Structure formats: structure tokens, C-alpha cells
Image (cartoon, rainbow, N blue to C red):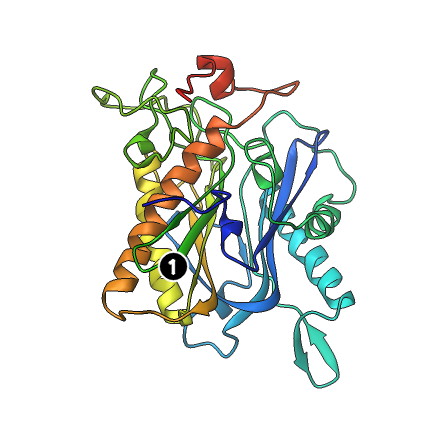
Amino acid sequence: MQTGPLNLITDITGLSVGNAENAKVKSGTTVLTAPDAFTAAVHVMGGAPGTRETDLLAPDKTVQKVNALVLSGGSAFGLDAASGVADLLRQQGRGFAVADQIVPIVPAAILFDLTNGGDKSWQRSPYYDLGQQALTQAKTHFSLGSAGAGFGATTASLKGGLGSASVITPSGHRVGALVAVNALGDAIVGETPHFWAAAHEINAEFGGFGPAPSAPPDWPATKFGGQNTTIAIVATDADLTQAECTRLATAAHDGMARALMPSHTPMDGDLVFAASTNAKPLKDPVLDPIYLGHAAATCLARAIARGVYCATPAPGDSLPTYQTRFGDLSQN
């Protein structure tokens, strides 16, 4: 398989991503949106999720499409980012018409970064404003690593971050992933620079260092107490129903399990949204969804590694970045 031109989720035409951060708070927000409402679904496998408007993403619910998806730091406070996004979308006239009202649909998920060293002594949550700032910054090119919802993220041994990747399937459909990596587990194999996701790497996108020659039996258990959660979006231009998007989100969790060791723990709120712009019909209703699910999983695994690989250091960090610890190991 080959990546899209940008190797970002925005290789799906029509999608844009915006990031906003608060360096003092050591946290941020990421928004994915499109000019037109798009089909969306969700699947949760972690034991400690934090969400907004995810019930309406079930296939049996009346609303089948959304106007934006929000990933945010801040734990429960971060859900306020979606309110900022919804208010700004409403001002722009974007949303669902209900009588004489416009109601934007903005599901959201949050990660826990409240103990990462930033100043959390706010009197008013900063996330409403961060949500609006991220929406105004939405474009096809966006930063990875210490950006947006991944700005203050961590893993077991390294800083986490915001990652993205894309791929073109044999049917010509595009699939992309966007993820904020804040895991209880680790993205690297033991004390080595090898990523668990190395088998899925394309074009040395996270260093080209290859798989580890052997895997250790455990990982550095340094994060507990619910201070975790990896939240993601997988998207495609394939024309999928909400039920088919639910299956896509479910399949994508395999990528999280391939890239983070362990994943889906009781202390993580691991969650995957799936989105479809409905632009390209399926050529084969049996085989295409299989390829799409596989592509979503491998894209998410790659995006997780890219998020950790691209993180940058900042004052007050409790953990080193990948580059600080191992240097630039790129073979390009």
C-alpha cells in the first residue's frame, strides 16, 4: 500500500484539521471538520472513557451525520471544547436545521493530562476557547507531535503526541487516521528505540529503525490512576453507512493494540471515531470493507508511532521525547 500525498488524515478530500494549545496549561485541543456534514460512528474499548454526544452515533439513532469531531486534553474539563466548536459552527450557519434553529452536532472525546506539570489552577476552563481556536485553524496541513490534543500527552516512558497517517487501498479508496497518544502503555519495545508498530511503517515515517529483534516480557508500569487514554479518528472517502463506520472504528482498534503495549486497559479510555465523506461508492461490497478495516488498523498503528516520534521537548516535561532519548534515527 502507498500513503496519500500528505500522509495525513486530510488526504481524504474535504476534511480539515485544526490544533490549538495552551503552553502554560500544557494541554490542547484538535478538531476535525468538513464543509458538509459527514457520517460518523464510534467504538470504545478502554475502561475509563470521557465523551460527549457519542450515544447518537449508534446506527439505530436518528442523526446519522455530524459537523465536527473533537479530541481534547483536559479530562472532563476538555469536553467544553466541543461547546466552543458548536457555538462557532452555529454562528457560521453550519449544523442541522431544527424548526428555526441551527444545531451543530459535535461529538467529542477527552484524555487525561491534568498531572503533566502544567498550570491547571484556572478559574474558567480554557477548553471552550481552545475549541474555537482549533476550529478557526482547520486546514489540510497541520502539525504532529506536541500539538493540539497531544500537546501534553504522555506514554509509559516517553512524551506522547498527535499523530496522523494515510493509505490508499487496492480499490482506490483513501483511509486516514488521527490520534492523540496518551497511553498507560508504551509505544516502544522495552528500552529500545524500536516501535511496536514498526512492521507497518511506510517510507521511514517514524525513523525507519525496523522491528525489535526480540520483545521483552513487560513494560515500565509508571502510569496508573486513570491518567491515560488514547483517542483517535479514522476516516475514509468510501461511501459507508453509520453501521459500516461502526465496524470500521471497531477494526481500527486492532491498530491501537499493535502500536501500544498494553492497550485498552481499565485505566485507559481508548476510543476510536470513524468518519466517511461518502464520496466514493464501494466497488465490491464484500471485499472493500475488509480492506478498509485493515487499512484503518494499520493507519492507526502508524499514526500512533508518528505522534510519539514527532513530539518535541518543553519546559517542565516529566518524560523525555523520543528524539531526546534516542536521537534522530531516520534512515532517509
Q: Nearer the viewer, residue 243 or 4?
A: 4
Question: Which quadrant of the rendered structure holds the N terminus?
Answer: top left
Residue at left offset 34%, top offset 34%: 201
Residue position marked by numbered label 1 in the rendering: 173
In terms of image quadrants, where is residue 195? top left
At numbered mark 1, what does the secondary structure look like: helix, strand or loop? loop
The x and y percentages for residue 68 are 60, 60
Can you see residue 261?
Answer: no
| Residue occupying the point 59% across, 27% down | 116
Would you place residue 1 above or below residue 121 in this image?
A: below
**Callout 1: 10 Å neighbours few (<14), some, many (20+)?**
many
Is residue 88 visible in this depiction of the protein? yes
Q: Is residue 170 left or right of residue 331?
A: left
Q: Vertically, is 292 above or below 265?
A: below
The residue closer to the viewer here, 302 or 58, is 302
Q: Quadrant of the C terminus?
A: top left
**Badge 1 amino acid:** His
63 to the left or right of 219: right
**Residue placed at 68% from the left, 37% from the top?**
21
- The part of the image, by quadrant, that contains residue 83 is bottom right
Residue occupying image coordinates x 29% and y 55% = 170
Residue 203 pos. (x, y %): 38, 32
The reply, left or right, for residue 121 in relation to residue 175 is right
* Residue 223 rendering spot, x and y as whole percentages: 44, 28
Q: Is residue 92 above or below residue 21?
A: below
